[in-house]
Amino acid sequence: MLSRLRPARFVALSLFCVLPLAAQGIAIDQGQVATDFQPLFDGKTLDGWLVQPRPQATGQWVVEDGALKPEGKPGALATARSFGDFELVVEWKTAPDGNSGIYYRVPPSAQSATGVAIEYQLADNARKASQEFPDRRNGAAYGLYPPTEDASKPVGEWNESRILAQGNHVEHWLNGVKVVEFEIGSDDFKQRVAASKFENPAFGLAVRGRIVLQDHGQAVWFRSVKLRQLGQKRVTIPAWDRTPVTQ
């Protein structure tokens, strides 16, 4: 459970309201005003962030040389604020065999982002899982869309990831290269979700939520975390039959 929650009036969708809406489709006016890029991390403290503890959590998130880093296995780190349409830019690096991720539009009511929200995968592409599964490579929409190319920097160097989420449209960029692009609710998206391991009927449907940095128990660093809101946009996410696709 997050160490504290924002008041309910800041929640555009919780898991409890998404589930009934998912059966009907969702149409929501966010009423959001466009902004310039604003830092989400001040480079010195954890102000504006909340720890989402894992079971039997150990260690803590620290600031090391101006970067966020999980020490031990403290759990994920989530923004205190929620965002709807946005452009997020993050610099990050991992150790060899590293694995982490950035979740977005995570409902504040969710105890964990896993299986609830879409994840921008951060990984050392030389690791076994990334070699075997393209949709687990750096820049992928984890478990759904593999990157179109490997734009990664060598392990240990800083990468720049960018997530653009506006309405149903999502783009993943890595070091200046667009590596993933999709539409939430499209036929292609529905087929990929139905064939995936994600069973939550509300998976990926929230139109507003937290940014969450994953703690996967391996060394990872995040710095220069900044976001700009993209302004008011009407969002429509159609519902669909979640019957698994048979091959």
Image (cartoon, rainbow, N blue to C red):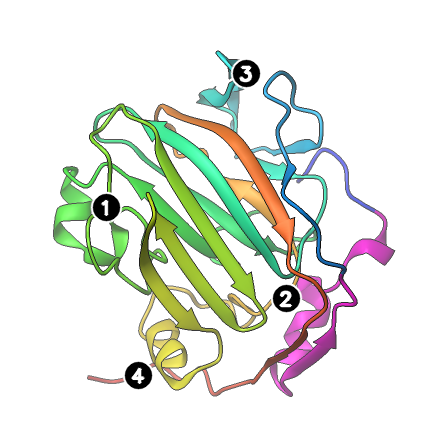
Q: Which residue is mark 4?
A: 245
Q: Nearer the viewer, mark 2 or mark 1?
A: 1
Q: How far apart are the two marked residues, 3 and 1, measured between alpha carbons?
A: 27 Å
User: Mark 3: few, some, or many residues within 10 Å (few <14, many ≥20)?
Assistant: some
Measure the C-alpha gap from mark 3 to mark 4. Answer: 44 Å
Amino acid type, label 1:
Ala
Quarter-of-image position of residue 42: top right
- Say whether disc 3 or disc 4 marks the residue closer to the N-terminus: 3
Residue 72: image quadrant is: top left
Q: Which quadrant holds the N terminus?
A: top right
Residue 207's disc is: 2
Q: Earlier in the sequence, mark 2 or mark 1?
A: 1
> Amino acid under label 2?
Val
Above-or-below relation of 225 to 107: above
Which residue does the image show at 24% across and 49% down from the upper left? 137
Q: Earlier in the sequence, mark 1 or mark 4?
A: 1
The residue at which mark 3 appears reads as: 63
> Closer to the observer: label 3 or label 1?
1
Amino acid at circle 3: Val
The answer to which image quadrant residue 93 occupies is top left
In the rendered image, is residue 111 in sight?
A: no
- Let me know if residue 10 is in the magenta part: yes
Distance of label 2 from label 1 (alpha carbons):
28 Å
Q: Is residue 145 left or right of residue 17?
A: left
Q: Residue at x 71, y 32 (%)?
A: 48
Q: Pointers 3 and 2 in contact (CB under 8 A)?
A: no
Which percent across, then down, holds residue 141? 36, 58
Numbered range of the magenta stretch = 7-32
Q: Residue at x 28, y 25 (%)?
A: 157
Q: Which residue sits at x=58%, y=38%?
A: 226
Q: Position of residue 203 (x, y in %)?
A: 51, 66
